[in-house]
Image (cartoon, grey):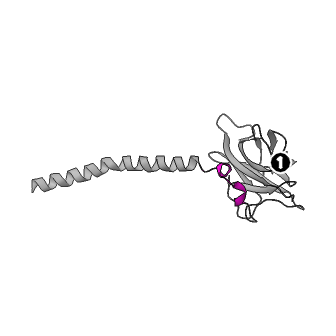
Amino acid sequence: MKIGKIRGSVLIYGSLLLLPLVLMATYVAAKEKDSNKYICSESDPQAMCNASTTCGSASAPCMVDIKRTASAASVTPGIPGAKENAPFCVKVGTKVTFKSESKNVGFVLDFGSSSPFGQGTIIGGADRPITTVANKPGCFKFSTGACVSGAIYGMCGETSTEIIVTAGGS
């Protein structure tokens, strides 16, 4: 009887020791998958562009809302049902307005050395929406920083997002 209890205890404790290893391996695998999620690294990123992922038109600008969230920043295009920080599309010639509907939020968008708007950095805020025209087709990854005005250290957040500019005018 005592041997049965020992075997049961070994099985339970052994399982408890293996559980963190399994959880860690699952977490690492998920992180590796997330790190390659950028659409711009795909062979044909424009293939994801359709009516439900394209913002703006010839008659209406693409409105992009930038917020400071609890843990980061978010970029949400004016597309019905759009998710925060998801890649979105615009056509060449489309006006894009970056703004913040949140009170007292300032933002910086950095496209690095390649921008679809002909400028590397866009700086604006709740009281200063920035409208620019997408004039260079391609897939562009950009970082966004958003801060609450008058905030103390740590009150800014950042995120990365992608915009695909398709040829063919709006």
- Describe residue 112's horizontal placement relative to residue 129 as left or right: left
Q: Nearer the viewer, residue 158 or 102?
A: 158
Q: Quadrant of the N terminus?
A: bottom left
Asked whether residue 102 is in view, the answer is: no
Residue farthest along the top direction in this orientation: 153
Asked whether residue 11 is in view, the answer is: yes
Q: Quadrant of the C terminus?
A: bottom right
Residue farthest along the left direction in this orientation: 1
Residue 17 image point, x, y percent: 31, 47
Residue 84 image point, x, y percent: 68, 54
Q: Is residue 123 above or below residue 135?
A: above
Task: Look at the image and give the residue range highlighted in magenta.
Answer: 37-49
Residue picked out by circle 1 = 136
Residue 140 image point, x, y percent: 74, 47
- Residue pictured at 42% horizontal, 47% vertical: 25
- Residue pictured at 77% horizontal, 50% vertical: 138
Image quadrant where residue 117 sits: top right
Q: Amino acid at mark 1?
A: Lys
- Residue pictured at 54% horizontal, 50% vertical: 33
Q: Is residue 91 above or below residue 130?
A: below
Q: Nearer the viewer, residue 59 or 105?
A: 59
- Residue pictured at 69% horizontal, 55% vertical: 44
